[in-house]
């Protein structure tokens, strides 16, 4: 029986195995895409929630809060408005009223009897601003005579003035129908401390100057974030302003807002939390309550036309106060600057209809942030296609904001918009960046592997269009440009050189050749010993001409690279190489060819064989590069070419036209070379026309002009042979190659 292990041994075993188990978990976690995305979304969601919490506690800036309030103000400005109550009228002390003059009285209103109350009022108004307070008494009396239910003066009268006695009599006569403005003011008495007081109307106007007087209401609005007024306090006490806790209930001696005092005439709603700030649903932007110039109630024409002889004012609550820029009585709202009296009207309208907005508890924002993070995680995991996922993120983000607007418009609810959308967006972006980095890393790994075989451009095309590449693996016919290079006399050279040195030089040579192929967008199909077969157009192509031109550029660069390499080898005392190159264009079969054990992505077909034949003929014609007719047709506009010969090779029923490359067409040829090329073309025509004596003469001249060129000597020898032994009648100028 196996004895039980001691507790210490058990503990030691766990301690030893714990790190291994943790490593296994982390490895699995590393390769689990959903796990990584869950961590990303959780961390980013926590970051947004943390930023919101820090800002709420004043420990960070206010960027998130600022954007949230901007969004709310946009909702206020574009959302549903509360219909203005038609029982509210705004008589504005505007510039036309303040600037009313004696000249206006003598010219425009000369027919108004000066002894009448209207004439007396206009005369007092024309005396200039500030008006005698008797004007306010006359305004109130005229409005009450027309049947107005109440009159609100959005004015501060803290000091005695002319006409106070008359105005006081009017207030006493209509003690339950008039409200005057008061004002809370503060003085800084220390760091972070303010001493508040309530400035009431002067005793010469208001018989009872106590704060609880129902004829007195404070005009103050307190700004919120960004200095914008979004809410109203309908009950406020000095103790509350000094920082005391809210009272248990409203008592008669408490000061009330001007809008609160006035709304009682129209059945103002009772507030469940009277001491809290009430978020107002506005009736619209500035100008919703259009001010009527106050002097018009004393002008007979206006009184009859605009007021229906007072019928318009029956059962109305009339607010009188400054209108226009002259008084500088404007407050910043979500719509911009709004006149103070119109803000009082907005506040009254909201109170009358109990049209206030509700904010959820503080945890609502955090719940929405984490809900948005969870939704972003689910979208990322469940939707793999990037375009579909982006569309889903955009649609759901926009849908949430639309739902927030619906809640504002139809449920009077303020739903936090910016923090959840930010969490949703950053979680989505974080996941996108992770997927993008992961895909880039994987593509980079595959690309590095591919670039061992093809050019960087071809590798990029394969990765960008994997479907077409995979389809090509099964085999397809396509037209390509090919070059085949081979080192001349390499077999003999390899027998003479040290094997290690041979491999080093061959690798150095092939490194340069492959680099040149890749530099011009080609791919190396295969190495055949020292030979290189390169292809353009098998993996990707723009057009046939570009493929042929890039192949030719690569071939010329390979020759130049070998020349420079030979110079370097010579200085190092090493043997040099000589290379021939064949270039062709035509149809091939491209695919993954081989056995079940080993396959090779390659090209096969007659075009490949012809390219090899062209390379084999370079030594015979003394050329480093020979190209076929199809390739020559594609590059002839960009390069100066030389017709070499028409050759019949073994295995081909149709003769090949061979061309050599002189150089780019943009380069100017020297006179001797131009003459030689012209003589060569004429000589070839004479040769094909069986005029061998003339052809021999011209080829002789070519040889004199270019003594290092073996091509004139080849043709000259043929002409001399045909002069002695003429070819048969069916001869068409085609030379039969004696080897492949």
Image (tube, rainbow, N blue to C red):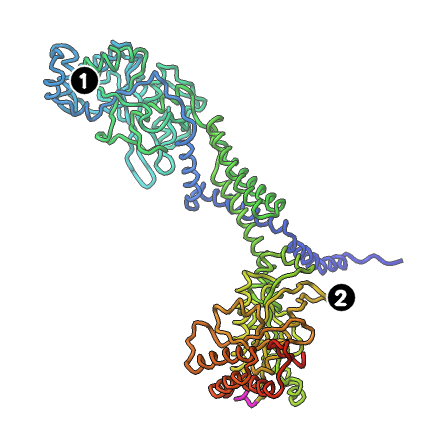
Give the prevailing secondary structure in the magenta stretch: helix
- 633 inside magenta stretch: no
- Name the side, left or right, on which 711 lies relative to 199: right
The numbered mark, 2 or 1, whose residue comes first in the sequence reads: 1
Dividing the picture into quarters, in which one does residue 208 lie?
Answer: top left
Q: In the rendered structure, find residue 595 and report the number of the disc placed on it.
A: 2
* Vertical position of residue 362 compared to residue 235: above or below: below
Depth check, front residue: 9 or 538: 538
Can you identify the residue that label 1 sits on?
A: 135
Task: Give x and y (percent) for residue 386.
Answer: 57, 48
Give me the residue at 18% from left, 24% from top. Answer: 98
Residue 197, x across and y down, in percent: 29, 29
Q: Is residue 496 above or below residue 461?
A: below
Image spot of residue 669 (x, y percent): 43, 78
Looking at the picture, does residue 380 appear above or below residue 622?
above
- Which structural element holds mark 1? helix
Q: Is residue 453 above or below residue 262?
A: below
Near mark 1 (Cα within 10 A), the count class, few <14, some 14-19 or many ≥20, is many
Give me the residue at 51% from left, 76% from top.
642
Q: Which label lies toward us, 2 or 1?
A: 2
Residues rendered magenta in the picture: 568-573
Q: Secondary structure at mark 2?
A: loop
Q: Is residue 568 visible?
A: no
- The residue lying at 53 percent from left, 43 percent from top is 424
Q: Quadrant of the N terminus?
A: bottom right
Answer with left or right where residue 152 lies relative to residue 709: left
């Amino acid at each position: 029986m196996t004895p039980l292990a001691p507790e210490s041994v058990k503990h030691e075993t766990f301690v030893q195995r714990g790190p291994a188990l943790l490593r296994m978990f982390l490895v699995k976690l590393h390769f689990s895409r959903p796990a990584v995305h869950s961590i990303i979304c959780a961390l980013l969601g926590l970051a947004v929630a943390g930023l919101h919490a820090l800002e709420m506690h004043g420990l960070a800036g206010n960027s998130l809060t600022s954007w949230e309030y901007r969004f709310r103000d946009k909702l206020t400005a574009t959302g549903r408005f509360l219909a203005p109550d038609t029982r509210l009228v705004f008589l504005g002390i505007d510039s036309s009223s303040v600037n009313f003059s004696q000249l206006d009285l003598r010219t425009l209103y000369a027919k108004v009897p000066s002894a009448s109350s209207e004439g007396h009022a206009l005369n007092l108004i024309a005396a200039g601003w500030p008006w005698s307070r008797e004007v306010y008494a006359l305004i109130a009396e005229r409005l009450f005579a027309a049947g107005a239910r109440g009159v609100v003066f959005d004015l501060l009268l803290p000091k005695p003035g002319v006409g106070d006695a008359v105005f006081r009599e009017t207030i006493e006569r209509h003690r339950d129908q008039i409200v005057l403005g008061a004002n809370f003011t503060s003085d800084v008495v220390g760091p972070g401390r303010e001493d508040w007081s309530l400035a009431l109307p002067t005793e010469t106007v208001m018989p009872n100057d106590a704060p609880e007087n129902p004829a007195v209401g404070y005009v103050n609005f307190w700004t919120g974030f960004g200095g914008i007024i979004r809410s109203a306090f309908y009950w406020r006490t000095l103790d509350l302003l000094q920082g005391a806790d809210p009272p248990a209930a409203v008592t008669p001696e408490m000061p009330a807002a001007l809008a609160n005092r006035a709304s009682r005439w129209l059945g103002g709603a009772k507030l469940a939390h009277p001491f809290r700030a009430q978020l107002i649903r506005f009736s619209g932007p500035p100008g919703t309550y259009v001010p009527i110039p106050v002097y018009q109630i004393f002008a007979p024409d206006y009184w009859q036309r605009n007021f229906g002889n007072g019928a318009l004012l029956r059962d109305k609550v009339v607010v009188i106060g400054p209108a226009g820029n002259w008084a500088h009585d404007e407050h910043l709202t979500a719509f911009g600057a709004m006149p103070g009296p119109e803000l009082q009207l907005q506040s009254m309208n909201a109170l009358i209809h109990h049209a206030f907005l509700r904010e959820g508890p503080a945890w609502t924002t955090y719940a929405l942030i984490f809900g948005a993070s969870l939704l972003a995680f689910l979208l990322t995991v469940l939707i793999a296609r990037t375009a579909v996922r982006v569309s889903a993120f955009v649609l759901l983000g926009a849908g949430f904001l639309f739902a927030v607007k619906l809640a504002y418009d139809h449920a009077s609810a303020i739903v936090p918009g910016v923090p959840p959308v930010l969490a949703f967006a950053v979680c989505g972006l974080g996941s996108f960046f992770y997927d993008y980095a992961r895909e880039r890393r994987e593509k980079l790994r595959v690309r590095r592997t591919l670039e061992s075989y093809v050019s960087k451009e071809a590798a990029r095309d394969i990765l960008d269009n994997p479907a077409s590449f995979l389809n090509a693996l099964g085999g397809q016919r396509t037209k390509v440009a090919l070059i085949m290079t081979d080192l001349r006399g390499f077999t003999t050279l390899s027998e003479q050189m040290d094997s290690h040195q041979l491999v080093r030089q061959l690798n150095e040579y092939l490194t340069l050749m492959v680099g040149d192929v890749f530099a011009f967008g080609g791919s190396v199909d295969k190495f055949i010993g020292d030979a290189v077969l390169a292809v353009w157009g098998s993996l990707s192509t723009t057009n046939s001409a570009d493929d042929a031109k890039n192949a030719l550029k690569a071939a010329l660069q390979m020759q130049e690279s070998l020349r420079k390499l030979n110079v370097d080898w010579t200085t190092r005392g090493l043997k040099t190489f000589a290379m021939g190159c064949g270039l062709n264009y035509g149809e091939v079969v491209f695919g993954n060819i081989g056995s079940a054990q080993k396959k090779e992505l390659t090209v096969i077909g007659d075009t490949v064989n012809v390219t090899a034949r062209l390379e084999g003929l370079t030594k015979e014609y003394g050329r480093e590069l020979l190209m076929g007719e199809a390739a020559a047709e594609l590059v002839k506009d960009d390069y100066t070419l030389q017709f070499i010969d028409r050759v019949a090779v073994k295995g081909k029923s149709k003769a090949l036209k061979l061309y050599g490359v002189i150089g780019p067409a943009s380069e100017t040829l020297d006179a001797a070379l131009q003459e030689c090329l012209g003589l060569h073309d004429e000589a070839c025509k004479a040769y094909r026309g069986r005029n061998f004596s003339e052809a021999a003469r011209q080829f002789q001249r070519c040889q004199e002009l270019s003594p290092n060129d073996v091509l004139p000597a080849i043709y000259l020898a043929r002409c001399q042979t045909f002069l002695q032994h003429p070819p048969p009648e069916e001869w068409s100028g085609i030379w039969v190659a004696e080897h492949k």
